[in-house]
Amino acid sequence: MAYLGVLMGKQLVLAEKPSVAREIARVLGCNRRESGFIEGENYIVTWALGHLIELAPPGDYNPRWRKWTLTSLPMLPDQLTLKVMDSTKEQFATIESLLQRTDVSDLIIATDAGREGELVARWIIEKGGYSGAIKRLWISSQTEQAIKEGFANLKEGYLFEPLYEAAQARAYADWYVGMNVTRALTCRYDARLSSGRVQSPTLALITEREEEIEAFSGEFFWTLRGHFGPFSATYQGEDDSSKIRSEELAEKIASELEGQTGQIVAITREEKSEMPPLAYNLTELQRDANLELGFSAKETLDTLQQLYERHKIVTYPRSDSRYITQDIVPTLNSRLKALEATPFGLVSNLYIEGGYREDLERFVKESGVSDHHAIIPTEQTVDLSRLSAKEVALWQLVALRFMEVLSGDYHYESITIEVAVGPHRLLSHQTFPIRQGWRDMARLLKREGEGISEPLPPLVVGDSLKVERISRRRNATKAPERYSEGTLLSAMENAGRFVDDSDLRKNLSGGLGTSATRADIIEKLIQNYYIEREGNFLKPTPRGREVIRLAPDALCSPVLTAKWEERLGKIAEGEEEPQRFIDDIKESTQKLVKKISESKEQYSPTFADGKVCPYCSAGMQRVVDEFDEVHFICQRLSCGYEEVLVKEVVVAAKTLQAKPASYSAGGKRVVVVKKRESEKVSLPKEVSTTKIKVVSPSRYIPQREEPKRKEAPTDSGGTTLGELLAASERRNRERDRKKKR
């Protein structure tokens, strides 16, 4: 490539997934496709498939740890080791051979520009035994221009070693805490339970909200609204509240107002303005997509990834920033130009020709950007006809917010009118737009804006107005609302608000998890049957509530994990040694295991829609698998009984008897006998029946004799839940791999 100059040897480029590698290879002029890589004159482009390397399981360090026992805990190897994943070992072997080629001068890491992407590459490099020079491609979009500019401005690999150390420290922490606490809970309570540094406090948020809802005792209150012709006003009590606590008092006040004449005693006019919202980071976009489009957090991230990788019309998805840097400002006109063929085209052209919001300080903030800037459109021309309906809907959210950020403030006049009717006081609040500013952008998508007040006639203090009628309304105080995925993401991001200690709260800026991992945490809680979706809301299962009751308080609090996340941030900045963090994690793990081991509690969930195990009498949880089949799973691990309801279609004969048919022909009555009475016509008829199939036999009692049961005949055999879950995980990984291609 001419723009990159003459190279000595070939540079090996390591991308995170095949689709990204193919695009980089195209831009670099690599066109010779081989198994697992694409080669050109100056470059060899290869790819991971997400993670190819993982931390070795406990049994690889100590044979005693192959068996799950409480006495073998805690498991704290001095040094964790890396292991090639079986499912991706062929691709790793390809990369390993490329790393050893004598014509490779150096390696360019082109995995996702973030903590996890750095870990993907560095573990491959370490396991592959590479010790040569390393460069880093760090870009925020996948457009051809961005790739060219990135390769023309490659960064030195050593600059990202602290980021790698932070990523590895996070992985080590998850291993030490997750492996030990999960085994401790499982062995202590004889149940398949798991816990983790982010999973547990997130589940605790959901269960605590459920407890608040159950403990809530609502009450009724009444409000009164007086109608004065040109406007209406709400009754205000002496405590400046509109709530009236009893119906009798509300009726008494209404009777004193109805038909009376009031007088305007005060009119307050105030011009106000509202600045545009900040640009999107991933969490804020997931929240709005859940609220406005009904997308799950994972659905938003997956769709956004397609817009970024395949269509190249949005910037890097996993961003936690809501600002851009100064070097992006000169590209704003090009990004506006790319919207020309979209509903935003007319306004974007006006902005290009006449300028846009001058106060860019709220959008441009160097200190507000760490790895990546806010999610905004790229310079790639947008063709909405090439997008799916989901992609269009999500892209419009991103583009709308981008246009809003570049637009002027919303200006409006706020008018408050106070009317006195005898001893009573009524207030009316009116809003009248002056300049719509950024709120006009929503109209480009034919979205309705907020309602505005009807114009008022000229009014002055002292005017008399008759109360034409009084409207009464009975209300009820509302229980706290369950978390939706959107509100849960916000709660995870702002975990500090759940901490009482003001000094500690200041240090919890990182929240629970990161913008890149929060969607996966929610999905994991659902897959473990700890929470379930109920409409647009998330509800804890009895199993999930038991996990929080039994897990150590320290692990369920956002304080511990947020402090860890903050320390990981310091490691990434080179401000803390990773070994010190790991030592503290090991110490915390010992305390957590000790607390679980010494617990006197029992695991005893109650399932309203479950059943009792016919072998050990423990509760059985009802779950619906990915094939919409209903399973009942015994919660006692030492029993392990599991059954599934299987619908079977039985074909039965439906018998029809022929009857004589008669009609008139030429004035004569003719009788036609189609079949003799003795002859019958049989048609197949499908009848659906439900049988119980044993997925996993009970280990609780000897299997010499099956207990008598009233249910339909069973069909023993099949696979275990663990095998089903493993198969499900393999299918999910395969789907993800296909998506990445």
Image: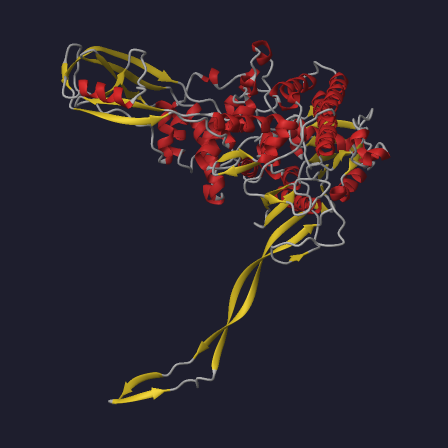
In this rendering, is residue 677 above or below 440? below
**Does residue 515 show up?**
no
Reply above or below: 127 against 366.
below
Tell me the quarter of the picture where residue 339 sits.
top left
Look at the image and tell me in which quarter the C terminus lies.
top right
- Tell me if residue 399 comes above or below residue 729 in the rendering: above
Residue 686's place in the image compared with 319, above or below, is below
Image check: 24 left or right of 442?
A: right
Q: Nearer the viewer, residue 511 or 210?
A: 210
Rendered location of residue 455, percent (x, y): 21, 23
Task: Tell which of 408 and 64 is nearer to you.
Answer: 64
- In the rendered structure, the answer to whether residue 89 lies left or right of residue 286 reads right
Quadrant location of residue 582?
Answer: top right
Q: Of 514 and 369, which appears nearest the observer?
A: 514
Q: Residue at x 45, y 37 (%)?
A: 293
Q: Does residue 645 appear left or right of residue 155 in this picture?
A: left
x and y percentages locating residue 175 in the rendered image: 73, 29
Residue drawn where x is 40% and y is 34% of the image: 345
Which of the image's four quarters has the N terminus?
Answer: top right
